[in-house]
Image: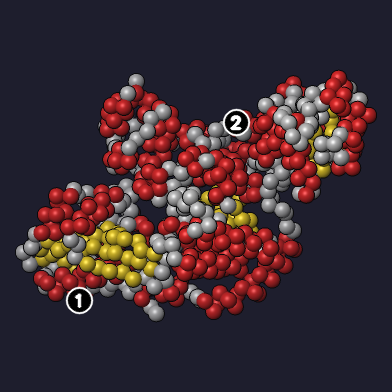
């Protein structure tokens, strides 16, 4: 029972407040967490989604599930399905979230058509190769197309989203389609998008967006252990209609298709009736005379909820805890499958205290907020449970159908990379590139051998100096142009050449471009200076561990090593630069 | 004190004890202060203090001192 209370307290967390969420997450009791069932989520993405992690974990914890999340590399979203890292293989859920802006740089129909195909292939590949449930995000509409939604890129994005949604609902039972545009319109584009970080960090969404997003997908991810609720128990007076039926009479209560506030109660009833399609059972618990209430259900022209929609009712003057227990017994369903909605905070408090397993929704709000209460609670959301047998069957079916297709397409990472049409360009930078190169030395942390931060003046001076050798790398593939994403600087030192800087932006990692780039640079250096020795350094920082053995991989000899710095040298003959897989056509 | 308030936000976001954040703290000296947590800290500071950083501030303010100084200028 104390767990239930903890969960209820957690549910009050403001998921959009970064500090609060971070504190909450760090403060979670490890002992409690370890007792919870675990679900694993893998996120395939091409933009910064890391701010989703904390609020989503907290949301899942509120539902009694410990969520492990692993996030794929930037711009390997299309590769992940082929490499299939173990994170994916073990995942219970795979979230595919892509921003078309980072893939398609023009608004040509052809490019978007290709993206559409790639997305569908990706979905099929995941379905064939994993057991996970896929959560597919639609593409975000560009924010600059508000004038005419039928023109240009917006039209194609909408048509891709439509076909994705249809695929998910009609053909792939193991998928859920989620449309980010609905969410953006729900909270407003200014609240959802942070244009500064969209450009600075490929992180377009605000904490408010991620908070709402977490509330939307946590019920799906937690479905297995915290299934959607099955029963809604409704209070009547000031919940299903305004006023008190026993006093105001059927003519006097507020319930109408035209006038406020009656119309708000009518809209609330619409939401309730919509739950019938989801298979939710409706019950009444009201302090009233039963015949008064039934008269409204049977005869009020604007009452959408009818007597035959109600599977159990306790309309009497007993306390509601007793009545809800009776309903549970009558239906032979657990209290933890029930939601109780009432406008009286006292009744809500009583149920929270007496029957903490029952979820409560307090309808003590202005009438205009009533219609969104049920949806906001997410109580009835979730992924429809599929039995293991169903899972196996659908999976067999899907894999049969898809395997041939996939096998025809790409059998391994090499051929996938080859099909990507990676086209790198190593060039001598000019004036107009120096700004970007300076920025790369300032910002690149992970794939950076020496992490020497330079200012614009230094970069200019080096590029102009005859004793320096400066090369830049620009990369594009079939999904777009990644721009200038690599820098190499070397310095002539008598008969040797010292490699001063070698770095790659994390945007393009995972494609073996480092080998391509360094090979080209070294070739050019030998053509230009034919040095005796190449001297290279690895300088350890807190963030560049992944390249600590880079020079070893190329065949350099270790000369001197301290905790901070590892010095290498090599002659040309001893170098063994691995050949990049994207060239293996 | 503003500096202590900022330290507390940083400690909450980086999930490290506040005692590990000295007055001279900067991005290169704290392991967890990576680009992602930098973004989180800046947003957290904006949320908590009700201020807005400019784009160049978001990029350039990578030490406790410089963050505090720029907030003071905004007051």
Residue at image location 67% in from the left, 37% down from the top: A372
A96 to the left or right of A46? right
Image quadrant where one finds the C terminus of chain A: bottom left
Vertical placement of residue A387 versus B49, above or below? below
**Residue A234 vertical placement versus A533 (above, below):** above
Q: Residue at x 53, y 34 (%)?
A: A24
- Residue A208 percent across, percent down from the top left: 51, 39
Q: Is residue A87 visible?
A: no
Give the image location of residue A480, x and y in percent.
39, 64
Quadrant where the N terminus of chain A is found in the figure: top right
**Could you tell me which chain the residue with mark 1 belongs to?**
A
Q: Residue at x 53, y 66 (%)?
A: A116
The image position of residue A443, as x and y in percent, is 29, 49
Chain under disc 2: A
Secondary element at tag 1: helix
Mark 1 surroundings within 10 Å by alpha-carbon count, few (fewer than 14), some (14 through 19), many (20 or more): few
Q: Gap between marks 1 and 2, in whole Å?
A: 65 Å
Residue located beneath label 1 in the image: A573
Describe residue A169's horizontal placement relative to residue A337 as left or right: left
């Amino acid at each position: 029972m104390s767990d239930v209370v903890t969960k209820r307290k957690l549910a009050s967390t403001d998921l959009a407040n970064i500090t609060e969420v971070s504190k909450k997450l760090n403060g979670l009791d490890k002992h409690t967490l370890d007792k919870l069932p675990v679900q694993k989520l893998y996120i395939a993405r091409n933009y910064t989604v890391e701010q989703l992690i904390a609020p989503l974990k907290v949301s899942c914890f509120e539902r009694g599930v410990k969520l492990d999340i692993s996030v794929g590399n930037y711009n390997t979203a299309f590769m992940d399905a082929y490499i299939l890292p173990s994170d994916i293989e073990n995942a219970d859920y795979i979230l595919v979230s892509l921003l078309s802006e980072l893939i398609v740089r023009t608004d040509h129909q052809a490019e978007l058509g290709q993206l559409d195909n790639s997305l569908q292939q990706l979905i099929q590949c995941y379905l064939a190769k994993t057991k996970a449930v896929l959560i597919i995000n639609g593409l975000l509409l560009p924010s600059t197309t508000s004038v005419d939604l039928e023109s240009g890129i917006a039209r194609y994005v909408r048509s891709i989203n439509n076909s994705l949604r249809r695929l998910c609902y009609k053909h792939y039972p193991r998928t859920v389609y989620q449309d980010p545009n609905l969410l953006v319109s729900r909270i407003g584009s200014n609240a959802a998008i942070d244009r500064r970080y969209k450009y600075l960090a490929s992180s377009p969404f605000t904490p408010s967006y991620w908070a709402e997003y977490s509330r939307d997908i946590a019920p799906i991810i937690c479905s297995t252990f915290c299934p959607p609720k099955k029963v809604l128990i409704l209070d009547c007076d000031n919940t299903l209609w305004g006023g008190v039926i026993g006093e105001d009479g059927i003519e006097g209560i507020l319930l109408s298709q035209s006038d406020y506030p009656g119309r708000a109660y009518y809209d609330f009833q619409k939401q309730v009736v919509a739950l019938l399609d989801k298979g939710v059972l409706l019950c009444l618990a009201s302090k009233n005379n039963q015949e008064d209430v039934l008269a409204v259900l049977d005869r009020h022209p604007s009452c959408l909820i009818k007597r035959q929609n109600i599977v159990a009712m306790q309309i009497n003057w007993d306390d509601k805890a007793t009545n809800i227990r009776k309903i549970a017994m009558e239906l032979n369903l657990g209290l933890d499958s029930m939601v109780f909605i009432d406008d009286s905070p006292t009744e809500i408090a009583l149920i929270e205290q007496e029957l903490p397993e029952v979820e409560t929704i307090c309808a003590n709000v202005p009438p205009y907020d009533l219609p969104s209460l049920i949806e906001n609670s997410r109580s009835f959301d979730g992924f429809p449970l599929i039995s293991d047998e169903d899972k196996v069957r659908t999976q067999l079916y899907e894999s049969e159908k898809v395997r041939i297709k996939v096998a025809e397409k790409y059998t391994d990472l090499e051929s996938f990379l080859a099909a990507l049409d990676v086209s790198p360009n190593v060039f001598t930078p000019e004036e107009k590139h120096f700004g970007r190169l300076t920025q790369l030395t300032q910002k690149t942390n992970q794939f950076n051998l020496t992490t020497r931060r330079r200012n614009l003046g230094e970069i200019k001076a080096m590029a102009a100096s005859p004793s320096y050798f400066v090369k830049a790398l620009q990369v594009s593939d079939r999904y777009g142009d990644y721009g200038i994403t690599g820098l190499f600087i070397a310095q002539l030192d008598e008969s040797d050449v010292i490699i001063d800087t070698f770095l790659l932006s994390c945007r393009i990692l995972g494609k073996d471009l480092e080998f391509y780039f360094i090979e080209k640079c070294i070739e050019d250096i030998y053509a230009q200076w034919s040095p005796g020795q190449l001297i290279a350094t690895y300088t350890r920082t807190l963030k560049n561990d992944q390249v600590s053995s880079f020079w070893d991989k190329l065949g350099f000899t270790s000369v001197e090593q301290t905790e901070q710095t590892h010095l290498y040298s090599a002659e040309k003959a001893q170098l063994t630069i691995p050949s990049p897989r994207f060239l293996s056509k | 004190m503003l500096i202590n308030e900022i330290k507390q936000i940083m400690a909450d976001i980086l999930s490290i004890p506040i005692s590990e954040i000295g007055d001279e703290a900067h991005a290169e000296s704290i392991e967890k202060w990576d680009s992602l947590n930098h973004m989180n800290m800046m947003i957290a500071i904006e949320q908590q203090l009700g201020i807005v950083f400019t784009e160049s501030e978001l990029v350039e303010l990578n030490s406790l001192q410089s963050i505090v100084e720029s907030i003071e200028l905004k007051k």
